[in-house]
Amino acid sequence: MGVFTLNRFNGVEKYRISEANMYAVKKDENEIMVWLEVETEREPLQPLPDTADCGMNPSAEVTVYVGRFHLKNFGEQEFVISKGYDKNRKDWTARLYYFEHQDVDRNTLKLTYKGNGIFDIHWTGVTTDISYYDGSKPDTRIEIFGECIFEEYADWS
């Protein structure tokens, strides 16, 4: 299904994606909210010493707002989300959960529709280090690469 990578100050931590799902909701006549949720396996593919014994694994969610969402014309699209927390909506547009919820900023989300409700995903962004929330370490760069399932695809075709 894919790999969830955390590029941290002390190396690279990797997890296998266990589940990735996409959802869509029409908010009003001109706005459709599309979001992606990514879960990982408990055991890392590549651990790092400071988190290896914590028993935690990351999950993430990203939301984009579009005017139209028609799968037959979707092809490949790229979305840029600069801030993980939208002050106007008072909600996260991109978040990571490891020990706590935190925003993911400077996001690029590339979605490629392959048909039958399957999308290729490539999502990158940056966040505060997952083990040092005080800002004492450089930001962590996340990279999520794999596939997701949009189960309601027939309704949006």
Image (cartoon, rainbow, N blue to C red):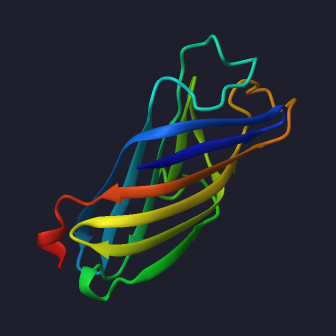
Residue 87 at x, y = what percent? 55, 54
Image point (47%, 50%), residue name: 2
Image point (42%, 74%), residue name: 112
Can you see residue 70? Answer: no
Image point (44%, 30%), residue name: 41
Residue 106 at x, y = what percent? 68, 60
Relative to residue 82, is residue 23 drawn left or right?
Answer: left
Quarter of the image for residue 148 reads bottom left
In this view, which residue lies farthest toward the front? 45
Can you see residue 81? Answer: yes
Residue 81 at x, y = what percent? 58, 65
Instruction: Identify which residue, 42 or 77, lies in the foreground.
Output: 42
Relative to residue 16, is residue 119 drawn left or right?
Answer: left
Number of dots carrying numbers: 0
Quarter of the image for residue 147 reads bottom left
Quarter of the image for residue 54 reads top right
Q: Quadrant of the C terminus?
A: bottom left
Compared to 149, does 27 lie above or below? below
Residue 78 at x, y = what percent? 53, 76
Compared to 142, does 72 lie above or below? below
In this view, which residue lies farthest toward the left? 155
Relative to residue 90, is residue 6 drawn left or right?
Answer: right
Compared to 149, does 70 lie above or below? below
In this view, which residue lies farthest toward the top? 53
Relative to residue 6, is residue 109 drawn left or right?
Answer: left
Instruction: Identify which residue, 22 or 84, lies in the foreground.
Output: 22
Compared to 73, does 111 lie above or below? above
Instruction: Identify which residue, 100 or 71, lies in the foreground.
Output: 71
